[in-house]
Image: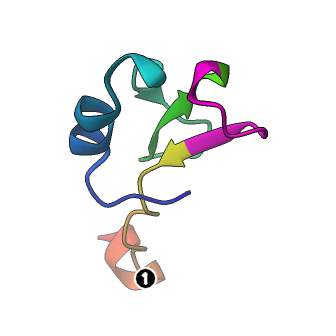
Amino acid sequence: MTVTDLDFAVAELGELVGSVRDAVQPGRRIATIRKQAGLGLPVALITPEPPRQNASAAAD
């Protein structure tokens, strides 16, 4: 689940969520909701994709 403010979401969920860490995708962060939350399925909270740079901006 994508969240715009991961730190706020983690603070609100308290003990029901693990610590925030860097995601595999560059520029993103992730935290997983624990089984104790009783959701029945694994759920992760992740920040949105960072804005993409166009090719000409990346070459500068």
Please determine whether, in this image, residue 41 is positioned above or below residue 31. below
Given residues 14 and 51, the one toward you in this image is: 14
Q: Residue at x 67, y 22 (%)?
A: 35
Q: Is residue 41 magenta?
A: yes
Q: Residue 2, image x and y in percent?
A: 49, 60
Task: Give the SS element for disc 1.
Answer: loop
Q: Which residues are magenta?
A: 36-44
The residue that disc 1 covers is: 54
Among the 4 quarters of the image, the one containing residue 33: top right
Q: Quadrant of the N terminus?
A: bottom right
Please determine whether, in this image, residue 47 is positioned above or below residue 24. below
User: Can you name the residue that lies furthest to the front here?
Assistant: 38
Identify residue type, mark 1: Asn
Left or right, 44 with respect to 53, comes to right
Q: Residue at x 67, y 40 (%)?
A: 39
Among the 4 quarters of the image, the one containing residue 56: bottom left
Q: Residue 28, image x and y in percent?
A: 45, 46
Q: Residue at x 31, y 23 (%)?
A: 14
